[in-house]
Amino acid sequence: MELFNLNHVSFSFPNTDQHVLKDISLSINEGEFLVIGGASGSGKTTLLKVLKRELTPAGQLEGEILYKGKLINEWEERQMVEQVGYVFQDPDNQIVMDEVMQEIVFGLENLGYSTFEMRKRVAEMVHFFGVEDLLNAKPSELSGGQKQLLNLLSVLLMKPRVLLLDEPTSQLDPVAAKELVLMLERLNKETGMTIVLVEHRLEELFAVADRVVLVESGQIRYEGDSRQVIGELYMDQATHFFPYVPTFARLYMEFEEKPVITAIPLTVKECKQWIGREEHEIAPVEAQSNRSKEPWILEMDDVFFRYEKKAPFVLKSFTLRIPKGQFFAMVGGNGSGKTTALRTSLGSIKPQRGKVRLNGQDMRKMKDSEWIGKIAYLPQNPRTYFVQQTIEEEMQTIGERLKLSNLTERMHHLLEAFGISHLRTRHPYDCSGGEVQKAALACILLGEPEMLFMDEPTKGMDPVSKQHLGELLYSLQQDGLTLFMVTHDIGFAASYAQRCAMMFDGEIAADGTPDELFKGNYFYTTAINRATRETKQPEVLTYEEAVATWVVRESIY
């Protein structure tokens, strides 16, 4: 049974002739797990929002949207509120109450449900999610994963027929993201609930999706089951969608002499089974370690920090040294202290104990003029960076403040490098998350700093944009720029960082090369590493490592 039916749907925002959606025709079946992907600004979030009548953006909507055979606008408001649930990308944007229990029942109370019915639904869902210990907490005390779980629980109490989710894992650490995907898969299989999920990180979603839709410039470019779409993407390598091909599939298509679309591995188990076949013995080529011998640009010694006088310390005897020209990445769970360590290292917050030195100088004793321009910071929410009406005006203001003589040339180079020249006259708040991220980076790099601090720089970026960002950061690092990145994106860190560290409980628990830190982990590693571990073949961390180091000895074909 078709739950949603979109017939020739187009959409444009006010005061513009440019369509965000262009002649979209799509059916969504009851009980289906549908995943929608696409580049930043491709229209996928707008496509999701037009399915939720109350969230449809202001603008010109053309075509028909049917829900259970009836135009979506003909349904009563209460019916649509209850039957179509929506979970936002940022969990903080959905929370409105000060207590977890109040937040959970907020929607039911507004619809006038009885106390008996509310208690019955809450009891069932709380047991299903196993979150009894969170009921007396405050939302502000929860981790990112717990907040997203709280939002999901609140929506599910309405007993929706369909659940819409906009990049629900974008702000979660690898463990929390995996748990959320497993929870959604369980909901879909055990309740028959229809799930429509917009995401950039499709690696693990191909295995759970019934159907995948990839959107480009407001139009559906690819549609089908996971293996069908992967096969089409691989065969059409010229398209910029190629980075969406998951590492399992790339490995299979690269090393299998006669690949079959229906045999493409989608899970660690399937990939292990394929790798383990005797006819695909692979010989490794020795990989070389790369450790820097440059002098320290950043030193943090025995640093302690807490936000309030009587609060627990967020950083405890934190010690870190980063040499000049290194790409350093820090990973760890939500609430482990990563962002606090980053902010302390760049001097935006002062530690209660310990020292932070930049180029050998104590940052407490440095004048602003001594470090401004030498370091730059990209915040987790890049929209907070902008104060001007357009990206171009923002860059001009920064350039004038830094008294850059080559401002026009630098602006043109950076806008071109990030592929956002067409956005120069647009307001930052009118750009997608990935576009804003790239615009903020372009602004930050205007002054040619010695060290760049980044808090979740790949958040909201599609695979193509992440690849471009990684290549650009690699180029900047080769030119001498030191990079300090806090991230949940293990794949990005493994591919581009020279050194990685894992935070736990306010301290660095482990530190080393990506190979040393990530290989052997269950969760803080890449999917391809889990698949190649404990097989006859050498363990690898990335697809690129496999291509560079594996040599097929022989084949039965």
Image (spheres, helix red, strand yellow):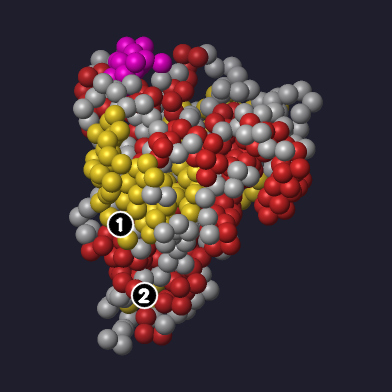
Q: Which residue occupies the foreground of this view, 362 or 188?
A: 188
Extent of the magenta region: 387-402
Q: 310 or 175: nearer the eye?
A: 175
**The label number, if any, that marks residue 272 in the structure image:** none
Residue receiving disc 2: 263
Residue drawn at point x = 45 percent, y = 49 percent: 197
Please provide percent x and percent y for residue 301: 64, 34
Q: Amino acid at mark 2?
A: Ala
Q: Nearer the viewer, mark 1 or mark 2?
A: 1
Q: Are marks 1 and 2 in contact (CB under 8 Å)?
A: no
Report if residue 511 lies within the magenta region. Answer: no
Q: State the image quarter where residue 557 is shown.
A: bottom left
Residue 390 falls within the magenta-colored stretch: yes
Relative to residue 69, is residue 409 drawn left or right?
left
The image quadrant of residue 45 is: top left
The kind of residue on which mark 1 rests is Glu
Residue topped by disc 1: 223
The percent position of residue 458, horizontal first and vertical second, equals 42, 41
What secondary structure predominates along the stretch shown in magenta?
helix
Count of numbered circles on the image: 2
**Secondary structure category for the residue under label 2:** helix
Provide residue 263's location: percent of width, then percent of height. 36, 75
Disc 1 crowd, CA 10 A, few/some/many (<14, 14-19, 20+): some
